[in-house]
Amino acid sequence: MYGPLWRRLPGSWPLRCLEAGLLLLAVVGVCFLWVFPVVADHLPFNDNTIGGQTGSHPSPPPARPSSSTPQ
């Protein structure tokens, strides 16, 4: 996959590296701006299973008694 892309890029080796880096940045930018926001609605990452009902706050754990006597 990368070989045909590398052969299609014009210029010398340093220019090809720069062009490949710019293409990579463009692909990452497109993913963050348009692809990920659309796909995020269909992924289960925001589905919480801990906490019970909406609006309920779990009580804090009971405090441990501190012992001042060394053992």
Image: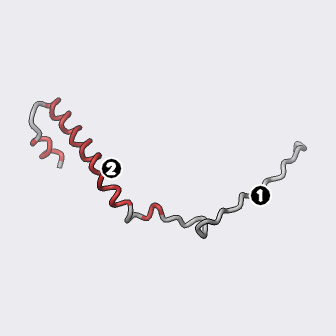
Q: Residues within 10 Å of mark 1 (few under 14, many from 20)?
A: few
Residue 26 rendering spot, x and y as whole percentages: 24, 44
Residue visible at 14% across and 41% down in the picture: 6
Question: Mark 1: which amino acid?
Answer: Pro
Q: CA distance from mark 2 to mark 1?
A: 43 Å
Residue with the most extreme bottom position: 53
What residue is disc 2 on? 32
Identify which residue, 44 or 17, lies in the foreground: 44
Secondary structure, mark 2, is helix
Identify which residue, 18 or 41, lies in the foreground: 41
* Depicted 49 relative to depicted 29: above or below: below
Q: Earlier in the sequence, mark 2 or mark 1?
A: 2
Question: Mark 2: which amino acid?
Answer: Phe
Nearer the camera: disc 2 or disc 1: 2
Q: Residues within 10 Å of mark 2 (few under 14, many from 20)?
A: few
* Depicted 62 relative to depicted 53: above or below: above
Query: Which label sits on residue 62?
Result: 1
Q: How is the image coloured?
A: secondary structure
* Depicted 36 relative to depicted 17: above or below: below
Residue 62 rendering spot, x and y as whole percentages: 77, 58
Residue visible at 26% across and 41% down in the picture: 25
Label 1 near label 2: C-beta < 8 Å? no
Residue visible at 84% across and 52% down in the picture: 65
Query: Which label sits on residue 48?
Result: none
